[in-house]
Amino acid sequence: MLVSLNWLKNYVDLQGLPPESLADKITKTGIEVEGIDYVAAKSTNVVVGYVESCEKHPDADKLNVCQVNVGEETLQIVCGAPNVAAGQKVVVAKPGAVLPGNFKIKKAKLRGVESNGMICSLQELGIVEKFVPKDVAEGIFVLPNDVEAGADALQLLNLDDAILELGLTPNRSDALSMLGVAYEVAAILDVDVKLPDTSVSMIEAKATDEVGLTVDAPELNPYYAAFVIKDIKVGPSPLWMRNYLIAAGIRPINNVVDITNYVLLEYGQPLHAFDFDTFGSDEIVVRRAKQNETMTTLDDQTRDLTTDHLVITNGQEPTALAGVMGGANAEVSDTTTTVLLEAAYFDPKAVRIASKHHGLRSESSARFEKGIDPNRVYAAGLRACQLLAAHANGTVLSDPVIFDRLDKSEKQVTIETTRINERLGTDMTDEEIAIILKKLGFTFEQDGEKFDVAIPTRRQDISQFEDMLEEVARIYGYDHLPYTLPQGAAQAGGLTKAQELKRFVKNYFEGAGLKEAITYSLTTTNRAQMLVSPEIKAQSVTPIRLAMPMSEEHSTLRLSILPEMLDSLAYNLARKQANLGYYEVGTVFISEEEKVTKQPKELLRAGAAVTGEWLAHPWQQEKKAADFFLIKGILEGLFDRLHVDATFEPTKIDGMHPGRTAIVKVGHTVIGFVGQVHPKLQKDFDLKDTFVFDIDLEYLIEQHENEPSFNKIPRFPTVTRDIALVVDETVSAGDIQQTIETNAGPLLKEIQVFDLYQGDRLEAGKKSLAFHLLYLDPERTLTDDEVEASYQTILTAVQDAHKAELRS
Amino acid sequence: MKERLQELQQEALDKVNEATTLEALQTIRVSYLGKKGPITEVLRGMGKLSPEERPVIGELANKVREAIANQLDNKKADLEAQALEKKLETEKIDVTLPGRPVSVGGPHLLTSIVEEIEDLFIGMGFEVREGPEVETDYYNFEALNLPKDHPARDMQDSFYITEDLLLRTHTSPVQARTMNEYKGNKPVKMICPGKVYRRDTDDATHSHQFTQVEGLYVDKDVRMSDLKGVLNQFAKQFFGEEREIRLRPSFFPFTEPSVEMDISCKVCHGEGCSVCKQTGWIEILGGGMVHPRVLEMAGYDPTVYSGFAFGMGPERIAMLKYGVDDIRHFYTNDVRFLKQYHKA
C-alpha cells in the first residue's frame, strides 16, 4: 500500500512530523514501512510556464522554439515534444533546476538556438512510466489553464510529497485504505480522524424507478447498492485527484473510472461503474454463474465460468465477474452519459476462488478477499456520487436500489487489566488501558478493571481477547515491555542419546578427514533411483514425486544421499578442486505404497564420497590416491567407535563397480554398502575414480549399546604368532579370517592381515596372505604349548576349508 | 715401584688427553687397565715388597687405576658428545619446508550455527525435538491456525505430494506434534531445527530448501516479557553482549500477539548504514505468544496455559553474521566455501 502523506493530511493531522519519524513510529507500532519515496520533493526551480508562442526550429524538423512566460520573465526554450503548442500551461524546469535522478538543467544551445530550461514530461519529474496518463505519455504534461504562470509546479502536481510504502501483513487489510491508515496514525499520534464529506444532493427522480435488483445468491452477496447518475460528461478528472492516484500507483484514465478508484483507495471499498445505456436491461440480477457459461471481461478476455463464480447480470448475460472485473459489454466509455454505480459486499472466499481461477488479482479483488468494512459500503457509494456530481457533471437520482442482509454489528470483546498485565508482564493501570482504547478509537464500557470493548467493523481481524492483547501491547509499545525470564520450574535441557550419537558420528567423520556437505533432498526422478542401497530398494515401492514440481531437477525425494553428493563433487571438480572428501547425514524418503497416501518412512542415512589424492605431500613426492580401502577404513573406524560388529561381502549394485563393492551387514541385517562408483556413472557425472558409502545411521543409533563397560588392562603380555598362507586368489581374506576366528579358541584376541602377495614367486592363480595372531590370557602368562596347539588347529582348519598351504 | 706407578699414571693421562677417537680410548683402557697392562705387571712384583710397603703400593695402584679410569670416562663422554654433535649437524633439515598435511574435515556452516543455537537454548533448559519433513496438511497448516482457504496460506506456497501431504514449509509442525505428545498437561520447552521447503526459484536470496530453528515454551503464566527476556539473552550470547534487540508488531497465524525481532546493526551500532538499509536495525527472527487456537487444538487449555514461540533462519543468520552474499553457497558444497568455516 502506497500512502501519500499529502493525501493522508486530509484526514489526520500529522503534526508536522518529518516523514522519517512518522515512518519509524508506524513501523514500531505495527505496520512495517518498507520505504519512503520523495518523488521530486528534493527538486527545485520547477514552475508553471505559459507558452506564449511556439515556432518550428529553423534547422530541426522535430524541435520547436517556444517563448515561455514563467512569471517574472519570459524564457526561450527549445522543446522536442510533439504535443507542445502555444497557449498551453506547462511545467518548466528553469536553468539551475535539479530534477529526480540528480539531473541538472543548464542553459544550452540546441542546433544553434539558445534554450533556457526544459518543458517537462511527467516521467522527467520522477513519475513511473506506467502510472502516467496515456494521453500525455508521449509528450509534455499540460496543466489546466487556471493555474498561474510562475507558480510552484511541484506543489501543483503534488510532487513535493513523501510516499510511504507499507508492507501489510495479511491481517491488517484495514490499512488497505487511506481512512484505515488514518485511524492507525491517529492512534499513534493520539489525534482525531476527519471523515470525508459524503453529503450529496439528489434529485427527486428515483433510482428504484429506473432499475430493479434481484440477488439470487445472498450467501455470496449479502449487500448490494446500485446508484443511478445521469448527465455524466466523461473527461479528465481534476488535477489533485490525478496526482493522488499517481502517488498511489494507479494510472488516471477518466473522471468516472478515476472516481471509483479514488474512493476505493480512500474507503477501501471497491466500486464498479457500468454504462447504464449499454447494460442491456433495467434489471440487475446477481447470481452464481452457470456451469460452462462464458463472459468477456474488460481486458477483452473470454472467461469460462463455473457455479463457484458470482456474476452480476442484466438478467440475460453477465456484465461483471463480481468483485474481480467488469464485463466489456457495459464498460464506461467517452460517450457514457448514465452511470449505474455498484457498491456491494461480496463473500471473501468466493472472490478469492474466482480471482485465483482466472489469475486476476486486482485492487478490488485483493480487498474483497480479505474482507471489507460492512459499514463503509454505502458511505463509499455516496462519496462516489458526490464526486461524480462535482467532477463529472453527474445528477444523482434519489432512492438507490439496495439489497441488504449484511451483518453490520460490532463484535464485543471483554478485557481485564489484570489479565492483560499477566499476559504481557506489565503493570498497566485501568486508566492507561482506557487511554489506549481511546487512542485506538474503540468505544467501550468500563467497570473497574473490566472493559467491554466494541470492535469497530473496520477491524475484521479482531475477535478475541488475544487480538485485543496485541492492540493494547502495540499501542503501549513493545519497547516498553520489561525483560523477564520465565518463572516456571527449572528443567534440565539437553540432547537425547540419539542426538548426541548423531553429533558423535559427525565429529568422527570430520576427524577422519571428511567435510560435511548438505545437498538437496529433491532430485531428479532418474537420480532418485541411482545408488540405492539394497535394503532401501527392498522397502521402496516407488520414488516419491511432487504433485507439481517446479522443475525436473527438484522433482523427486531422494532415496540415497549419494547422487546429489556426486553432483557436488562434479561442481568442485569443474572448478579445479580435485581432492575431495565429503560426508552428509540426512534423511531419505521411502514409500511402501505404489500411490502415496500416507507419510513416507524417513530414515537417517550417512553417505560419504572421496576422490582424488588423499594425504599428498608434494615436495616429498608422496601421493596417495583415495581408494576402496580408504573409504572402507573410515567406515570400519566408525563401527569400531560404535562397537558394531560389521561384515563386508562382495556384491553388485546398479551404478557401482561390480568388482569393488561390498554390502555391509550387521549379523544378517544389511545396513548399506561401500565401494567404487561404476566408471560409466563416474563418466556421466564427469568424475574421476570415486569411492562412496551409504549406511543406515538410524539402525546404528538404535542398536547402540550405552556406555562401554570397563575391561581390565591386561597385566600379562600378549603372544604373537604369524601365519602365512598360500591360497587360490579367489579365496577372500574375510573368509580365511572367519575360519581362523571360529577355530582359534578363546585365547586368540585379534587377527591382523599384514601381507598380501601375488606374483612371480607364486604359482599363477595363487596368492599369499599373512596374518598376525595375537594371543592373550588376562589371568596368567601363556605357555608356548597352548599357543602352538591353537596355531595347529587353525592351520588344519584353513587347510580343510580353503585348501590353504603354509607358505614356505 | 712408586715412581713407576706415578710415571704410568702420567703417561696414561697424557695419552687419554691426546686421544681423539673412541677406539683410541678403548686401546688405552685395554693397554693400561687390562690384565696384561703395565699396572697389573707392576702389581705382580708386589710379592717382593715388604709387608709394610704392600698396602701402601696397593692403595697407590688403585688410585692410579681410578684416576686413569675417570679420565677415560670423562674423555669418552666428551668424545661422545662431540660425535653426537657432529652427527646431529649432518641430520639438519630445512625447517621452513611445509609439513605433511593432515587430512581434516569439518562441519558445514549451517550445522555449526544450528548446533550453537541448540547449545544456547539447551543452556536455558530447552530440549531439542525433530519431526518428519514430509508433513500432513493438518500439522503443517491446520493445527497452526491456518485452515484451508486462509489468506495467510498465500504467504508460503508449498510442495505438495498429495492433497494431504507436503514437504513441510516450516518446522512449526514439530511444535504441534510435541504438544500433542505431552497431552496438554505438562510444560513444553523445546527447539526444533530442521530442513524446510518452499516453492521458490533458487536465486541469490531464495532457496527451495532451507533451514529453520523454531522454539516453543508453553507453561502456566508465560508472559510476553518472558519472550523478550529469552530472546534478548539469546541475541546477546549469539551475536555479542553489545547488541541491542527491538521487538516490532507483526503477524503470524499461529501467534497473537506476534513480533518481529531486530538486532542493532553491528556495523553502525544503530546509526544507519548500507548494511541495515539506513534503519540501524537488522531483522533476525519472528515470534509471538502462542495463539489460543493452537494451544486448544493441541490439547492445552488456553485459559490455564500460555506460551511463546519463535523461529529463525540459520541461512539468513549466517549471511548476516559472515556476510555470505548468496544463499546458494550453502547447497553447492563448494569446498572453497566450506573450508572457510572449519576454523574456530
Image (cartoon, coloured by chain):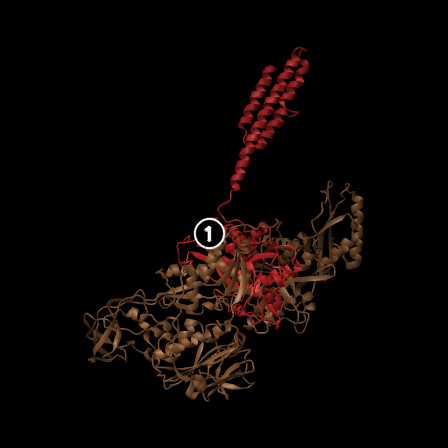
Chain in brown in the render: A
Give percent across and percent down for residue A533: 66, 65
Instruction: Identify the image quadrant of residue A349.
Output: bottom right
Give percent across and percent down for residue A358: 51, 79
Amino acid type at circle 1 is Glu
Q: Is residue A318 left or right of residue A41?
A: right
Circle 1 sits in a helix, a strand or a loop, which is it? Answer: loop
Q: Give the mark count.
A: 1
**Vertical relation: A784 (above or below) B159:** above
In the image, A147 versus B115, the foreground residue is A147
Give percent across and percent down for residue A234: 35, 83
**Vertical relation: A281 (above or below) A427:** below
Give the residue pinned by disc 1: B244
In the image, A148 versus A456, the foreground residue is A456
Instruction: Identify the image quadrant of residue B71.
Output: top right
- Residue B335: tell me if it is visible: no
Return the chain for callout 1.
Answer: B
Callout 1 crowding tier (Cα within 10 Å): few <14, some 14–19, many ≥20:
some
Q: Residue at x 56, y 85 (%)?
A: A291
Q: Is residue B339 left or right of residue B30?
A: left
**Vertical relation: B291 (above or below) A486:** below
- What color does chain B have in the rendering? red
Q: Is residue B145 left or right of residue B274?
A: right
